[in-house]
Amino acid sequence: MAEITAAPSRGAPIVWRLATVRRVVRETDRAVSIDVEVDDWPGHLAGHHVDIRLTAEDGYQAQRSYSIASPPEASRLTLTVERMDDGEVSPYLVDDARDGDEFELRGPIGGHFTWHVDQGGPLLLVGGGSGLVPLMAIVRHRIAQHGTVDTRLLVSTRGPGDVLYRGELMGLADAQGLQIHFTLTRRAPSNWSGWTRRVDAEMLAAVGPSPADSPRVYICGPTAFVERVADLLVDAGHDPARIHAERFGPSGT
Amino acid sequence: MSPITRGFGGRRRPEVDPSRVPPGQYVVNDFPVLSAGPTPRTPLDEWSFEIAGAVDEPVSWSWEQFLALPQETFTIDIHCVTKWSKLGTTWTGVAIDTLLEDVATEADYTLAWADGEYTTNVPLEDLVDGRAWVVHTFEGEPLEPEHGGPARLLVPHLYFWKSAKWVRGLELTLDDTPGFWEEAGYHIRGDPWREQRYWSD
């Protein structure tokens, strides 16, 4: 039996390309955003991720996947990486990577978690911790396209210092049709008047949109977070087929 | 030739047998979860497993009938396309060979389908000769829903997305029909030892 090697047309092949670090921005104590210049990057959609491959001097290699934080409109690709303390790749990227460093990168990967402004909404985006990264690409794409589609973003983190893109999110408070909500599950400042609990049914009902409006839902975060939020939304009457989930386990190192 | 990444040393795992780790993979001790939507929960009294499509006579089993089939317990390594491998995992289930015993077909391919509108294509030859199962027990415990319970396909010699969670049937097909991830750009066959992650690999 012949193996199929001729693939349908899918655009550029997913091959390793040289990526050169052009800027490293510290987002939180545990996370950085790394702008890279990628040779012949074929472009991507908001929500896509990439594989990267690092090579040590003795030839040892390690591969990992990271979400793209930058929208398709950006001139450089931005990856936001959170340090996993027992990880192999993320501690290097968060603590050591600097301008001019090189590694390999390929993509874009993952068609199920993407959104293009033409797909419309309404949108419900729910991010746990660094699960915000691909959702931010969606928000940035919507802004870059001057989109006005009803968009609700719910960000769940342990404390205020764990919120990625905090300044940028604050600056989006007046964006048309975009509502941003935070819940701080472990450490809330004394003057914090927002939610201080794990995402629950009542919170999701308050964030909306209602299941009757059939929002496209994108949930990204640790496995347990995504499981819980997806279950709550299904129980609330959201169509499971409209719920896009991207889980990363403790092994997302 | 890959560029050297300045300052990257990596972290070798001397205790891991490299001959068991396909290229680009790393070994984990936990069991990560990856799926594209909410976890479906089909009650066992509504569960069935069906073999249909290009067959003379479709066959199906209720949960009780499925559990009454000859069961196998075995230990294998699994490899996820997102780079993690888990070595020495023990499962119990029914061999696809057993399920196909009374099925007459001209098909060379299958499309496994599952609750949650998931599909994945697997050549029939990858499912037979003791290389694939429908499993319901992991490490002696009923398979958790987030890991594909009540039952999932298990094709350990291919990347783990081929091992459809919440599997409910096999559609036997004459042609290779891309499933969910295959449509989204992942490799049509997915052999980890040849690092067939994406369509162009």
Image (cartoon, helix red, strand yellow):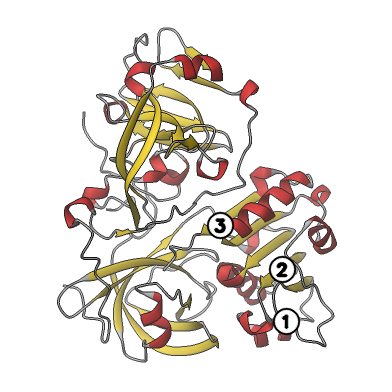
Q: Which residue is mark 2?
A: A153
* Camera-side mark, 3 or 1: 3
The answer to whether residue B175 of the structure is visible from this angle is: no
Asked which quadrant contains residue A141, the reply is bottom right
* Circle 2: residue type: Leu
For the residues tagged 3 and 1, is the chain the same? yes
For the residues tagged 3 and 2, is the chain the same? yes
Which mark is on residue A223?
A: 3
Q: CA distance from mark 3 to mark 1?
A: 28 Å
Q: CA distance from mark 3 to mark 2?
A: 19 Å
Q: What chain does badge 3 belong to?
A: A
Q: Earlier in the sequence, mark 3 or mark 1?
A: 1
Looking at the rendered image, the quarter that the C terminus of chain A falls into is: bottom left
Q: Which residue is mark 1?
A: A172
Q: Earlier in the sequence, mark 2 or mark 1?
A: 2
Crowding at dot 2, Cα within 10 Å, few <14 / some 14-19 / many 20+, comes out as many
Mark 3–mark 2 CB contact (< 8 Å): no
